[in-house]
Amino acid sequence: MCGVIRRAAAQDIDAILSLIDANTDRLVARDPDEVRQLIESFWVAEEDGQIVGCCCLEIYSPKIAELRSLAVRDGYRRRGIGARLTAAAVDEANRRGIPQVLVVTSNRDFFERLNFGSCLNEKYALFWNAPETAGE
């Protein structure tokens, strides 16, 4: 189990970006300015002075927030770090009175084990993607 889960600070930005960049096969990439703007919404897992995990709770309204950028460094997975980071974000949503936290994921089983599930009678989030522009 990792040493500590804590709110991220400005000095953690490079480590957070490194974690996200190492997982872009599963996560949406973030640029440094975006992480800097959202740093107060990030949590990090720290072990032996190293950042080994991160996640962000992006608040959209008093009713809904999104858990984003959950990443755990290779070699530290399957130790409960992702679950603890998720719990920190969900606890913050509860503290703020936000009744729903959504997650867009390719790892449905992980989040279902943490009590995430479908809502609104099995409705699904669908996305429209802009067509690629020729010549770009």
Image (cartoon, grey):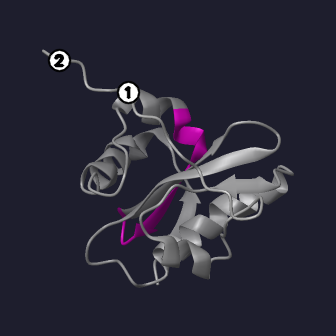
What residue would you read off at disc 1? 130
| Residue 80 numbered tag | none
Q: Is residue 12 visible?
A: yes
127 w.r.t. 135: above or below: below
Front residue of 120/79: it is: 120
Measure the C-alpha gap from mark 2 to mark 1.
Answer: 12 Å
* Residue stretch rendered in magenta on the structure: 38-51
Q: Give the image quarter of residue 89.
A: bottom right
Q: Give the image quarter of residue 132.
A: top left
Front residue of 50/115: it is: 115
Verify whether residue 77 appears in magenta.
no
Q: Residue most toward the left? A: 135
Dot 1 falls on a residue whose secondary structure is loop
Instruction: Please identify the quadrant where the C terminus is shown.
Output: top left
Q: Give how far across and how far down residue 108 sits, in percent.
A: 50, 71
Q: Are marks 2 and 1 in contact (CB under 8 Å)?
A: no
Q: Is residue 3 visible?
A: no
Q: Residues within 10 Å of mark 2 (few under 14, many from 20)?
A: few
Q: Give how far across and how far down residue 83 sits, in percent.
A: 55, 75
Q: Residues within 10 Å of mark 1 (few under 14, many from 20)?
A: few
Q: Give how far across and how far down residue 130 sits, in percent.
A: 38, 27
Residue drawn at (62%, 49%) of the image: 66
Front residue of 72/99: it is: 99
Verify whether residue 41 appears in magenta.
yes
What residue would you read off at disc 2? 134
Dot 2 falls on a residue whose secondary structure is loop
Q: Give how far across and how far down residue 36 sits, in percent.
A: 46, 32
123 w.r.t. 65: above or below: below
Residue drawn at (50%, 41%) of the image: 127
Residue drawn at (43%, 66%) of the image: 46
Q: Amino acid at mark 1?
A: Ala
Q: Give the image quarter of residue 131.
A: top left
